[in-house]
Image (cartoon, rainbow, N blue to C red):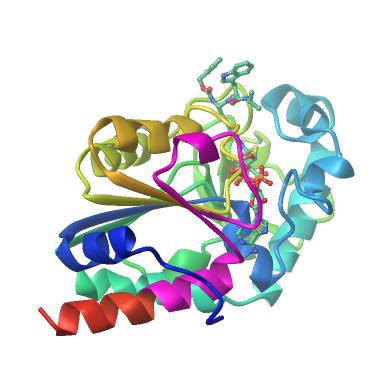
Amino acid sequence: MSSIKISDRLKNVLRSATRVTVFTGAGMSAESGVPTFRGVDGIWKKFKPEELANFDAFMKNPDLVWEWYKHRKQIITDIKPNAGHYALAEMEALYRKFSIITQNIDNLHRRAGSKEIFELHGNIERNYCVGCGKFYENQEVTEQKRAPHCPACGGLIRPDVVWFGEMLPADEWNGGVEASEHCDLFFSIGTSAVVFPAASLPQIAKASGAYVVEINIEQTDFSARADEVLIGKAAEVLPVILKISKELISQK
Ligand code: BJW
């Protein structure tokens, strides 16, 4: 943990910043036991996204897609937020404005105690009917082996997540853009930064003048444009950043 080097420049920004925005991807939850999408053990190594994470695939084979999400719901039910999620939740109290924009559907930021969260790709704990739009909690539907049908209209019920080719929820997206445009410090954490439009947010933050820090176990497509890249696990780097932020802010 102590081997992570935080530059003086970042320390200065951590001390002076009032608005901090954090953008997270699957690597954020890796230490909790949620598989990433494109890593060595990534989900897409076993399943092709076009077979599972799009609306046409769901309508063609709803039971297969439902089974896959049911499996992932089970993983998420069984796990807990990690030290990185808890560090971010604690950092929220240190800054005047602190926003989390997440691509993750696992609800772990909320479970760790973070308050301002924009969920760009939905939340696996919710479901809705493709026919009438009625929402269903997981408890109401996950017991079912096959894709469930809506008791109200008979339509298929799907997870409330954003599949390829679908628009992101407007309020969450607009909130995420606003938080990226108006921050002093922006962290891009545990994302390969290849899925758009989400991957444009670090670029928006950079173009708007934020100091942009990437935290990842390896370089990404975005690394060359970041002001600073911290190579390490989110669950190990973030507690170090929290500790330094607390020290710097207490000295102000
Ligand atoms: C660690 C770590 C540790 C590991 N610590 N780090 C150009 C060409 C073709 C298509 C497009 C295009 N531009 C846009 C598109 C369309 C498409 C897209 O971007 N495709 C690209 C792949 C090219 N985008 C869309 O379709 C989006 N909608 C859209 O554009 O609407 C407008 C539109 C409408 C109609 C027609 C056309 C356009 C929607 C995207 C929805 C993405 N959905 C998913 C599934 C969600 C539900 C589910 O979970 O099942 O979202 S796909 C998947 O990717 C998921 C993720 O949120 C998302 C991003 O992945 P993420 O989080 O970055 O994970 P990984 O695995 O890629 O990376 C993990 C990283 O962590 C790695 O870097 C590791 O190194 C690191 N790591 N352990 C720190 N411990």
Outermost residue toward the front in this view: 8
Q: Residue at x 70, y 75 (%)?
A: 78
Q: Is residue 157 left or right of residue 18?
A: right
For the C terminus, give its image quadrant.
bottom left
Q: Quadrant of ligand 1?
A: top right
Kindly tell me whether residue 137 is visible in this rendering: yes
Please say whether residue 112 is visible from this viewpoint: no
Is residue 128 within the magenta segment? no
Vertical comparison of 199 with 76: above or below: above
Q: Position of residue 51 (x, y in %)?
A: 82, 30
Side of 89 where 83 appears, left or right: right
| Residue depicted at 57% across the width and 42% down the height | 161
Residue 176 higher or lower than 83, as above or below:
above
The image quadrant that residue 86 belongs to is bottom left
Residue 210 locus on image (x, y percent)? 26, 43
Residue 30 falls in image quadrant: bottom right
Q: Is residue 118 above or below residue 109?
A: above
Task: Point out the residue furthest to the left here.
Answer: 252
- Asked where in the image residue 96 lies, by quadrant, the reply is bottom left
- Which residue appears at 62% of the width and 45% of the height? 219
Residue at point 77% right, 33% down? 49
The span shown in magenta is 215-241
112 horizontally vs 193: left or right: left
The answer to which of 193 and 210 lies nearer the viewer is: 210
Q: Where in the figure is residue 149, as x and y percent of width and height? A: 70, 42
Q: Quadrant of the N terminus?
A: bottom right
